[in-house]
Image (cartoon, rainbow, N blue to C red):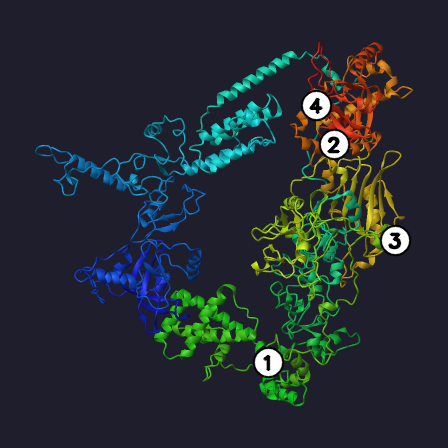
C-alpha cells in the first residue's frame, strides 16, 4: 500500500505498449488485483486513468521504486494513503472564529475532510471536469467508475441509473457470514454453495462475504442453515481467556456497599476487574438485514447455547457442521442425539438443504410408485363430491412437494407421517377391496419396501400406522365373512364347457425383438386422416418425413420406392442439383452406388456427392479411395472446373470421376492431398493423367509422362508408335525414343531463347491496344488512366504466378515466431532486444517486423496457417514477414541465407519505403502458371499475344469478350439431353377432364382459420407488390397444412403465429397446438367474427384477437420474436417482419399431445392412416373362419384397402395412384390386387403380394427404361438397381403397407386379432406379434365362441327359429334350469346403478343438456337398422347371446330393450304361466313403478343379453322426445370399448335368494353364482 511501482502495460500505446509509473492505493482479495494511480507519461504526453492490475503477473514486469533500505523502518503511510479506508469520517468543528482554511496543512483533520470532497476515494486523485462520479448512498464516498471494487463499466453504470437502484460500496455492505463491515477490503458477492439454505422466493437475498469469511467458506467452516461462518480456534482462545479471568478474579476488600445500586465509586459504571462474560449481551439495536437471530449470539463471549462452536452437529450428507439452535434443537434433544438416544437424529441428521433434497427424493419415489395417479393431486369436488365431508385432513403428493420445496419439513420423518395420512385417507374413503382401495394398499406396501427402506431409514413409523393396519385387519375380516356366505359351487368346470367340449390352453410366445424385414432409416410421420379427407388427399403427394403435402415445388421423388420428400426434410442439396440429378434422385432408404447399381455391405464404404446427393462406392472410383476423405467431396459430373472449363476430359465426365473442389477437376488438382501428384503429373502442363489415358509419352531419361497436346515431339512419338508401316533402321533408331523438354534442355538439344518476355513487351502491347481502340476508356477515364489501370492489373496478375514463393516467406516468418518464443518467451521480447542492440538495421525494418508479429497474432497464423485468397494481401504480409526474418536472424545470431527458405524472394522484398512512406514493390518475371520455365519471346508471340485482347477485356475490365469463339465447356451444359422431372400428384382433374360432377378438391380445413387446402407462401424474396390504394388489401399466404392428431390440420403460419404455441429450441417442433385449438374455439376474430382467433396483440390490456390472415388484413404488424401488435399499438415496436407468411424451408411438425376427442364421437372406422405415399382406408376384418389370411410374419385380413402413389406403368416419369386390396376368394384364399388410377382396366391380381409387386415392377421398368443409364458410364441418368432385396419399401408386404411398422401396430390391436394365434387347423402357422398381443382370456373366449358355433350346428332344427326349440334345446345347451324374472328390477335401484356409473346427480340445466344429448344419440342409433349392428348367436355362457357386428365406443348406445308394456299384476300372473308352461326363462324389465316391459313373446334381440361378472354394458332408463310426447326408454350403454364380434353382457344384480343360481360366464373374477 502506498508504494511507488513501475510496470509495463500492453493495453496502452497499441501495439507497442508502455512502461508506466504509479502508486498502489488499494488491494482487492476478491479480484486478486491492486488499484494503481498512474503518474504523468512523458511518452504518451498524458496521464492514464487508475486501473486494477495484477502485480503478480510476469507480463507487467513490476519494480518497486521506493524500497526501504535494509535495516530501516518502513515509511509511515501518508494521509492520502489512508483516504480510501476512512469510511464515515466526519472532522471536528473548527475552534475559534469557526473559519475553515482554504489550504489546510497535510496531517490535519481539515485536510482529510477537504480531500474526501475533492478527491476520489479510490485513486485519491482530484476530480476533473467531465469525470463520471458515482457516490455510495450510505457513506457518501465518491469514486471513479474504474476505481470501485469491483470496477463498473459505463454500460453497467447506465443500467444502474435507469433501474433507480442505490449504489452501495463494498465497505458498506454487511457480511452474511459475520454481519460485520469489512472496512479494509469490503464484502463481495459470491456464488452460494449448493448446501447453503437460501429462500428461493427471496430473489434479493445474496451472499456477500468479507475477506475472513471467504477463507472460512473455502474451508467449509460455515453453518449451512444460517450461513454464519465459525472459527473454532478463535472460540477456544476466547474461552480460555474467560476461564483464566474467572479463576484469577481478585478478592474484594472492605465492607459491603450500603446501596447496591450506588455505582458512584466507579466512573465508568462497571467494575472491569470483576467482569465476566454474561449469558446474553443485551442489544436493543434492530437486527441486520437477513439476520434471523441476534448476531451477538454467535460471539464467543456471549456463550448463548445453540449458536456457538461447541453446540454443533455434523450433517451426515454434506458433512458440514450445523448449529443446534439453527436446527431448532433444545438442549435435551441435543444431548439425546449426542448419546445416540434420539429416535430420528441419532440415525441420521441432515441440514436444511440436505433434508429438503431427501424429502424431494422420497416424494419422487412415491410418485414413481403411484401407478394410477391416485395420490398425484388434491381430490377435487368434481372427482368426489363428498370427499371433504368424510376426510377432514386431506393430503396428496403435490401438496407434499410444495411443502418440501418451501423447507417446511423439519426432517423427513414428517414426510413419512404425511405419507401415512395420505394412505389412511384413501383406505377410509374407498370401499374395502375396491380397485382404489387395493391400489392404496399396494402403494403403501411398495413405498415402505422400495422408498423408505432405502432412502428413508431414519423416519420411524408415524402416528397413523396403527390405524392403517387396523383398516387392513377389518377388511380381511369382511372378506372372510363374504367368502363363508357364498355357497360352494361344485360345477366350476362348466365355465369351460360348451356343449361337452373343453377349451384348450394357449401358450403365447414372447414378442419379437424387431419386426420382419428392413425398416426405414428415415423417420416417418404417421398421419391420422378422416375418412372423407383420405378419399381426396390420397390423390396428393405427401412428404414421407413431415406428412405435409404443401411446398410441392421443393419435393423430390425416389426413383425406386416412389416416396416423396421435401428437399429440406431429406437434407438434399436441391439448389445445386441439375435436372438429371433431381430426376434420378434416390431417398436414403434406396441409396445405391451409381457405378455398380448395388449398395455395399459396409455403409461406410459409400460416399455421397455434396452437389447431387448420389452415392458412390469407394473402391469403384477413379482413382479409388480406401477411406472417406474429410471435407467436401464432389462427383466428377458435378465439377465445373474454372481452370480448364471441363475440356481436359475428351469424352466428358464419367461417373467414376471425383474431386474435392467443385470448381477444380481432377486433372487440374481437385484431388490434391489424396493422390500422389508427383507420380501422376504431366511433365509440361503439370495437370494429372489417368490410368486409362492413351495420349501419354514417357520420357526415356526421367520416366516422366507428357501429354501429346503439351509437346509436339510427344505427339510425333505417339504417331510413330501407332504407325504399322514405320520401319526404323539402326541409324534412325534414336529418333524412336522420346525425351521431355526438361531433359532436352539439360542435354543442350534445345535452342536458346531469343529473349525473355519483360514488362516492357507488355507495356508496348498495352500501348498498342489503347492506341488502336481495342479497349475504349469510359466517360470518366482518360487514355493514360486506362493504360495505368491495365498495367497495374497485369503486374498483380504476374505476381499471382509467384504466389507460392510469397506464401513460403510468410510461413517461414510463422516458423521463426515459434523459435523466438522458445528462446525469449515471446516475440515482443526479441523486438525489445532489437531496439536496444541492433543499431545498424534501419528503423523501418523493425517497424515492419513488429507489425508482422501483431498481424500473425490477430490472424492466428500459428494455429490455422496462412492461405490468403487475394494476391495483394499475400504480398503485403510477405513484405512484413521478410523484415521479421531479417531482424530475427540478426538478434538470434543466425545466417539469413542458410537458415531461411526462399532467401532470394526475401531479398527482393527487403526494399525500403518511398520518401512519402508508401511501400514500393518490385516487378516479377512472367512464367507459365504451374511451371517454373520463364516464357520466351517465341512462345509469347505464338501463343499469348493473340489472346491478350480477350483476356484483358474479361479479367481487367470485367466485361464479356467480344469474341464468342471460346471453347470452354462448363458443368451447366451437361451432356446436351433434356431430362423430364416428375411433378407431384394433385387430384384426378387431369384424368376426368372438365367434368364438373367429378372435380377434385382438397377438403382439409385448418382448425384455426377454417380455410381449406394448402396455401404455399413462397420464399422471403417473393414479397407481395406494394399498392398505393388503401382499399387494396393483400391477403397473406397461410403456408402448408400440418397434420395434427385425430384428423385435424393447421396451416403453418396459423400455428407459428398463435399466442399459445412455441417452437422448440432445436427447431421444427411446434408445441401447445392443442391449447391454441381449445382457446380458439372460445374466441371470435375481431376481423371476420368467426371462431378460431388465436393471434392476439401482446400489448397489455389489449383484447384484440384475430385469425392470421385477418390480423394482416386489419393492419396488425408482426415482429421477429413471433409477436404481433394490433393497428392501434403497432407503434410500440420497431422490430418488424416485412412478410410474416413466408414458407419456412425446414421440417415442421406439430408436437403430439393427448387427444381430447371423445371416444364415443370418433371411432377407428372414422380415421385412416397415412404414411408417406401410402394411405390405408380400411384395415379389413381379421378372418375368424379360415387360416390362410396370416402367416408367421404378416397379417393379411380380407377387406384390407389402401392406396399408394407410385410410378405409372403407362406414362414414363409420371406418378399416379394405385388401389391396393386384399379380397377373399370363393375357396377362402386371399387375392391381392393392384389397380392403377390412370389405367384401371389393367388391374394386377395374384395370390401373394410379392408376386403382384413383381408383376407391377416389370411394367414400371418397361415404361421408364429409357430414363436410366443402362450401363453408360458417361450418362447423367441414374443407374438401374441391381437387386431390390434387403431394401425398405421394395417388397410386396411393405408396398401394400401391412409390412410397415405403423400398419403392423394397427393390425395387431384390431378386433378379432385372437384368430391369428388360435388357428383352426393345428398345422396352420401361428403369427408372432411384434408390439402387442391378445390376452390368454381373449383367446379362450374365441375358442368358446367357436365351440358355441359348433354346438349351434348340432342343435340346429328344421324351423331355424330359436323360440320353437323349447326346453329340450335349452337343457342340451347346458344352461341353468331356473332363471325367472331375469330382468325385473326396481326402477329406483336401476337409476341408482346408472347414477353410480355416470356420476352424481346434476342440476336442472345440465340435466336438460344431458337429455338433449341423449336424444341426439338415440336418433343416431335408431337411424341404423339393428340387423346391421347386432346379431343373436349361440353363447358359451347360456343358450343364446347378443353379439356386435361393429365396434362400439364407451358410453355409446347399443340397443333399446323393447317388448310388451304391462302392469305389475299382469307380470305376476305371466311369471307363473311361464313356469308352468316350461318356458325356461322370462324376459321382463321394470320401466317405472307402474309399468314393466315383457320381451318374452314380443320384443327384439336385446333380450338375449347374458349375465357376466365382468360386464361390458349397463342398462339405464332415459327420457326422450317421441311423436307421442316425452316417453321413457330402457337403453343399454357400453361400459367400455367393445370390439366387433364380441358378446354384449351386463350384470343382472340378482338379490340373494334361497339357493344360488350358477354362473358360467368364465370371467376372471367370476364368483360362480348369479346371486
Residue pointed to by mark 1:
793
**Pointer 4 with pointer 2, Cβ within 8 A:** no
Left or right of 822: which side holds 1416? Answer: right
Q: Nearer the viewer, residue 1104 or 159?
A: 1104
> Where the N terminus falls, by quadrant?
bottom left
Inter-mark Cα distance, 1 to 2: 91 Å
Q: Nearer the viewer, residue 1466 or 744?
A: 1466
Q: Secondary structure at mark 3?
A: loop
> Where the C terminus falls, by quadrant?
top right
Residue pointed to by mark 4:
1391
Vertical arrangement, residue 1139 with respect to residue 447, above or below: below
Q: In front of the other: label 1 or label 3?
A: 3
Residue 765: assigned label: none
Q: Position of residue 235 (x, y in %)?
A: 26, 40
Q: Position of residue 404 (x, y in %)?
A: 47, 36
Q: Earlier in the sequence, mark 4 or mark 1?
A: 1
Left or right of 1055: which side holds 191? Answer: left
Quadrant of residue 57 within the rendered picture: bottom left
Residue pointed to by mark 3:
995
Q: In front of the other: label 3 or label 2?
A: 2
Residue pointed to by mark 2:
1414
Q: Earlier in the sequence, mark 3 or mark 4?
A: 3
Q: In front of the other: label 3 or label 4?
A: 4
Q: Earlier in the sequence, mark 4 or mark 2?
A: 4
Inter-mark Cα distance, 3 to 2: 43 Å
Which residue corresponds to the image point at 79% horizontal and 44% vertical from the top-left?
A: 532
Q: Earlier in the sequence, mark 3 or mark 2?
A: 3
Q: Position of residue 1086 (x, y in %)?
A: 66, 52
Work out which residue is located at the far front of the displayed protein and give it. Answer: 1525
Q: In front of the other: label 4 or label 1?
A: 4
Amino acid at each position: 500500500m502506498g508504494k511507488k511501482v513501475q510496470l509495463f502495460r500492453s493495453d496502452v500505446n497499441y501495439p507497442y505498449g508502455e512502461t508506466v509509473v504509479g502508486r498502489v492505493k488499494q488491494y482487492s482479495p476478491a479480484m486478486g488485483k491492486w488499484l494503481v494511480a498512474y503518474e504523468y507519461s512523458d511518452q504518451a504526453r498524458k496521464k492514464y486513468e487508475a486501473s486494477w492490475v495484477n502485480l503478480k503477473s510476469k507480463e507487467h514486469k513490476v519494480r518497486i521504486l521506493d524500497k526501504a533500505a535494509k535495516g530501516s523502518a518502513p515509511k509511515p503511510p501518508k494521509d492520502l494513503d489512508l483516504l480510501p479506508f476512512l469510511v464515515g469520517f466526519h472532522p471536528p468543528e473548527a475552534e475559534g472564529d469557526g473559519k475553515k482554511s482554504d489550504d489546510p496543512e497535510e496531517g490535519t483533520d481539515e485536510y482529510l475532510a477537504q480531500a474526501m470532497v475533492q478527491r476520489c476515494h479510490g485513486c485519491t486523485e482530484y476530480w476533473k471536469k467531465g469525470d463520471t462520479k458515482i457516490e455510495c448512498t450510505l457513506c457518501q464516498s465518491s469514486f471513479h467508475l474504474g476505481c470501485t471494487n469491483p470496477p463498473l463499466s459505463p454500460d453497467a453504470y447506465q443500467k444502474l441509473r435507469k433501474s433507480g437502484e442505490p449504489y452501495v460500496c463494498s465497505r458498506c455492505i454487511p457480511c452474511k457470514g459475520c454481519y460485520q463491515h469489512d472496512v479494509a477490503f469490503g464484502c463481495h458477492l459470491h456464488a452460494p454453495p449448493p448446501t447453503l439454505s437460501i429462500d428461493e422466493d427471496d430473489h434479493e437475498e445474496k451472499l456477500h462475504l468479507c475477506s475472513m469469511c471467504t477463507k472460512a467458506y473455502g474451508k467449509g467452516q460455515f453453518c449451512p442453515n444460517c450461513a454464519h461462518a465459525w472459527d473454532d480456534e478463535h472460540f477456544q482462545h476466547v474461552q480460555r481467556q474467560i476461564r483464566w479471568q474467572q479463576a484469577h478474579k481478585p478478592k474484594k476488600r472492605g465492607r459491603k456497599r450500603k446501596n447496591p445500586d450506588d455505582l458512584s465509586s466507579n466512573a465508568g459504571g462497571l467494575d472491569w476487574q470483576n467482569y465476566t462474560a454474561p449469558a446474553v449481551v443485551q442489544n436493543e439495536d434492530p437486527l441486520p438485514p437477513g439476520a434471523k437471530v441476534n448476531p451477538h449470539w454467535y460471539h464467543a463471549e456471549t456463550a448463548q447455547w445453540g449458536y456457538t462452536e461447541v453446540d454443533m452437529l455434523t450433517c451426515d450428507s454434506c458433512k458440514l457442521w450445523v448449529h443446534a439452535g439453527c436446527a431448532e434443537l433444545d438442549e435435551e434433544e441435543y444431548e439425546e442425539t449426542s448419546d445416540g438416544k434420539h429416535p430420528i437424529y441419532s440415525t441420521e441428521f441432515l441440514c436444511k438443504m440436505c433434508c429438503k433434497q431427501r424429502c424431494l427424493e422420497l416424494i419422487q419415489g412415491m410418485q414413481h410408485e403411484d401407478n394410477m395417479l391416485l395420490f398425484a393431486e388434491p381430490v377435487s369436488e368434481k372427482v368426489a363430491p363428498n370427499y371433504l365431508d368424510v376426510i377432514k385432513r386431506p393430503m396428496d403428493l403435490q401438496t407434499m412437494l410444495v411443502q418440501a420445496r418451501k423447507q417446511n419439513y423439519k426432517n423427513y420423518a414428517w414426510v413419512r407421517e404425511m405419507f401415512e395420512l395420505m394412505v389412511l385417507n384413501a383406505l377410509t374413503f374407498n370401499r374395502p377391496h375396491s380397485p382404489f382401495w387395493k391400489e392404496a394398499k399396494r402403494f403403501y406396501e411398495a413405498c415402505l419396501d422400495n422408498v423408505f427402506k432405502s432412502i428413508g431409514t431414519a423416519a420411524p413409523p408415524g402416528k397413523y400406522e396403527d390405524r392403517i393396519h387396523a383398516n387392513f385387519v377389518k377388511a380381511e375380516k369382511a372378506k372372510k365373512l363374504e367368502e363363508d356366505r357364498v355357497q360352494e359351487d361344485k360345477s366350476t368346470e362348466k365355465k369351460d364347457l360348451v356343449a361337452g367340449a373343453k377349451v384348450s390352453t394357449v401358450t403365447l410366445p414372447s414378442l419379437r425383438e424387431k419386426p420382419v424385414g428392413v425398416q426405414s432409416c428415415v423417420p416417418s410421420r404417421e398421419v391420422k386422416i378422416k375418412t372423407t379427407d383420405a378419399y381426396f388427399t390420397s390423390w396428393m403427394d405427401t412428404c414421407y418425413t413431415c406428412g405435409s403435402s404443401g411446398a410441392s415445388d421443393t419435393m423430390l421423388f425416389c426413383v425406386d420406392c416412389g416416396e416423396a420428400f421435401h428437399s429440406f426434410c431429406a437434407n438434399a442439396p436441391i439448389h445445386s442439383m441439375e435436372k438429371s440429378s433431381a430426376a434420378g434422385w434416390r431417398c436414403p432408404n434406396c441409396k445405391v452406388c451409381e457405378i455398380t447399381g448395388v449398395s455395399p455391405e459396409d455403409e461406410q464404404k459409400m460416399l455421397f456427392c455434396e452437389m447431387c446427393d448420389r452415392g458412390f462406392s469407394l473402391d469403384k472410383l477413379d482413382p479409388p479411395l480406401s477411406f472417406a476423405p474429410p471435407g467436401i467431396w464432389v462427383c466428377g459430373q458435378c465439377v465445373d472446373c474454372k481452370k480448364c472449363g471441363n475440356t481436359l476430359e475428351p469424352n466428358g465426365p464419367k461417373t467414376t470421376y471425383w474431386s474435392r473442389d467443385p470448381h477444380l477437376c481432377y486433372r487440374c488438382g481437385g484431388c490434391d492431398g489424396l493422390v500422389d501428384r508427383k507420380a501422376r503429373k504431366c511433365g509440361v502442363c503439370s495437370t494429372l493423367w489417368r490410368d486409362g489415358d492413351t495420349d501419354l509419352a514417357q520420357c526415356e531419361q526421367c520416366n516422366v509422362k507428357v501429354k501429346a497436346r503439351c509437346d509436339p515431339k510427344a505427339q510425333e512419338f505417339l504417331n510413330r508408335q501407332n504407325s504399322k508401316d514405320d520401319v526404323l533402321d539402326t541409324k534412325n533408331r534414336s529418333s524412336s525414343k522420346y525425351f521431355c523438354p526438361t531433359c532436352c534442355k539439360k542435354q543442350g538439344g534445345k535452342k536458346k531463347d531469343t529473349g525473355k518476355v519483360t514488362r516492357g513487351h507488355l507495356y508496348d502491347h498495352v500501348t498498342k491496344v489503347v492506341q488502336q481502340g481495342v479497349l475504349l476508356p469510359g466517360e470518366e477515364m482518360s487514355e493514360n488512366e486506362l493504360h495505368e489501370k491495365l498495367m497495374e492489373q497485369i503486374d498483380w496478375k504476374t505476381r499471382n504466378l509467384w504466389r507460392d514463393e510469397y506464401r513460403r516467406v510468410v510461413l517461414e516468418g510463422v516458423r521463426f515466431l515459434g523459435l523466438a518464443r522458445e528462446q525469449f518467451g515471446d516475440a515482443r521480447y526479441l523486438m525489445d532486444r532489437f531496439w536496444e542492440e541492433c543499431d545498424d538495421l534501419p528503423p523501418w525494418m523493425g517497424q515492419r517486423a513488429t507489425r508482422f508479429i501483431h498481424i500473425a497474432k490477430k490472424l492466428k497464423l500459428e494455429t490455422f496457417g496462412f492461405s490468403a485468397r487475394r494476391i495483394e494481401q499475400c504480398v503485403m504480409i510477405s513484405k512484413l514477414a521478410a523484415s521479421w526474418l531479417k531482424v530475427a536472424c540478426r538478434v538470434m545470431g543466425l545466417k539469413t541465407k542458410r537458415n531461411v527458405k526462399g532467401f532470394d524472394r526475401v531479398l527482393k522484398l527487403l526494399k525500403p519505403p518511398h520518401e512519402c512512406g508508401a511501400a514500393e514493390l518490385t516487378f516479377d518475371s512472367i512464367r507459365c502458371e504451374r511451371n517454373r520455365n520463364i516464357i520466351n519471346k517465341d512462345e509469347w508471340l505464338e501463343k499469348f499475344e493473340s489472346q491478350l485482347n480477350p483476356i484483358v477485356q474479361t479479367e481487367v475490365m470485367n466485361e464479356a469478350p467480344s469474341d464468342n469463339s471460346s471453347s470452354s465447356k462448363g458443368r451447366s451444359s451437361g451432356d446436351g439431353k433434356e431430362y423430364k422431372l416428375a411433378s407431384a400428384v394433385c387430384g384426378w382433374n387431369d384424368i376426368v377432364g372438365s367434368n364438373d360432377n367429378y372435380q377434385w378438391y382438397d377438403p382439409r380445413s385448418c382448425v384455426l382459420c377454417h380455410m381449406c387446402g394448402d396455401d404455399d407462401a413462397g420464399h422471403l424474396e417473393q414479397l407481395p407488390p406494394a399498392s398505393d390504394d388503401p382499399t387494396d388489401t393483400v391477403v397473406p399466404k397461410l403456408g402448408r397444412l400440418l397434420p395434427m392428431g385425430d384428423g385435424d390440420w393447421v396451416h403453418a403460419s396459423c400455428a407459428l403465429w398463435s399466442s399459445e404455441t412455441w417452437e422448440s429450441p432445436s427447431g421444427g417442433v411446434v408445441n401447445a397446438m392443442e391449447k391454441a385449438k381449445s382457446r380458439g374455439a372460445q374466441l371470435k376474430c375481431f376481423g371476420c367474427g368467426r371462431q378460431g382467433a388465436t393471434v392476439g396483440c401482446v400489448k397489455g390490456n389489449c383484447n384484440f384477437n384475430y385469425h392470421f390472415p385477418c390480423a394482416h388484413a386489419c393492419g396488425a404488424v408482426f415482429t421477429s420474436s413471433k409477436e404481433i401488435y394490433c393497428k392501434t399499438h403497432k407503434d410500440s415496436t420497431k422490430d418488424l417482419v416485412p412478410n410474416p407468411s413466408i414458407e419456412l424451408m425446414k421440417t415442421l411438425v406439430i408436437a403430439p399431445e393427448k387427444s381430447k376427442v371423445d371416444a364415443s364421437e370418433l371411432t377407428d372406422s372414422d380415421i385412416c392412416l397415412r404414411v408417406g405415399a401410402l394411405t390405408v382406408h380400411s384395415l379389413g376384418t381379421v378372418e375368424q373362419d379360415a387360416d390362410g389370411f396370416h402367416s408367421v410374419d404378416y397379417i393379411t385380413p380380407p377387406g384390407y384397402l389402401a392406396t399408394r402413389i407410385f410410378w405409372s406403368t403407362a406414362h414414363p416419369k409420371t406418378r399416379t395412384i394405385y388401389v391396393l386390396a386384399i379380397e377373399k376368394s370363393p375357396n377362402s384364399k386371399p387375392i391381392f390386387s393392384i389397380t392403377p388410377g390412370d389405367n384401371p382396366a389393367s388391374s394386377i391380381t395374384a395370390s401373394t403380394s410379392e408376386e403382384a409387386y413383381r408383376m407391377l415392377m416389370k411394367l414400371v421398368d418397361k415404361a421408364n427404361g429409357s430414363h436410366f443409364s443402362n450401363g453408360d458410364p458417361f450418362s447423367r441418368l441414374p443407374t438401374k438397381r441391381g437387386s431390390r432385396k434387403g431394401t425398405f419399401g421394395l417388397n410386396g408386404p411393405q408396398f401394400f403397407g401391412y409390412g410397415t411398422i405403423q400398419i403392423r401396430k394397427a393390425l395387431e390391436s384390431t378386433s378379432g386379432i385372437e384368430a391369428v394365434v388360435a388357428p383352426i387347423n393345428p398345422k396352420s402357422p401361428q403369427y408372432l406379434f411384434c408390439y402387442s398381443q391378445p390376452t390368454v382370456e381373449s383367446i379362450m373366449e374365441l375358442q368358446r365362441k367357436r365351440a358355441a358355433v359348433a354346438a349351434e350346428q348340432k342343435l340346429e332344427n328344421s324351423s331355424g327359429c330359436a323360440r320353437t326349440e323349447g326346453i329340450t334345446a335349452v337343457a342340451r345347451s347346458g344352461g341353468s334350469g331356473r332363471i325367472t324374472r331375469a330382468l325385473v328390477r326396481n326402477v329406483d335401484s336401476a337409476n341408482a346403478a346408472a347414477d353410480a356409473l355416470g356420476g352424481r346427480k346434476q342440476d336442472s340445466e345440465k340435466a336438460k343438456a344431458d337429455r338433449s344429448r341423449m336424444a341426439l344419440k338415440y336418433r343416431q342409433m335408431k337411424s341404423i337398422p339393428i340387423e346391421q349392428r347386432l346379431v343373436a348367436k349361440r353363447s358359451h355362457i347360456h343358450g343364446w347371446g347378443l353379439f356386435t357386428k361393429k365396434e362400439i365406443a364407451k358410453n355409446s348406445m347399443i340397443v333399446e330393450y323393447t317388448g310388451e308394456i304391462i302392469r305389475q299384476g299382469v307380470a305376476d300372473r305371466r311369471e307363473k304361466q311361464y313356469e308352468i308352461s316350461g318356458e325356461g326363462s322370462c324376459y321382463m324389465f321394470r320401466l317405472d313403478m307402474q309399468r314393466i316391459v315383457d320381451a318374452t313373446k314380443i320384443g327384439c334381440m336385446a333380450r338375449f343379453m347374458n349375465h357376466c361378472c365382468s360386464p361390458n354394458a349397463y342398462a339405464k332408463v332415459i327420457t326422450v322426445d317421441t311423436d307421442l310426447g316425452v316417453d321413457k326408454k330402457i337403453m343399454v350403454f357400453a361400459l367400455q370399448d367393445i370390439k366387433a364380434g364380441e358378446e354384449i353382457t351386463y350384470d343382472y344384480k340378482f338379490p340373494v335368494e334361497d339357493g344360488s343360481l350358477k354362473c358360467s360366464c368364465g370371467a376372471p373374477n367370476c364368483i360362480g353364482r348369479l346371486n
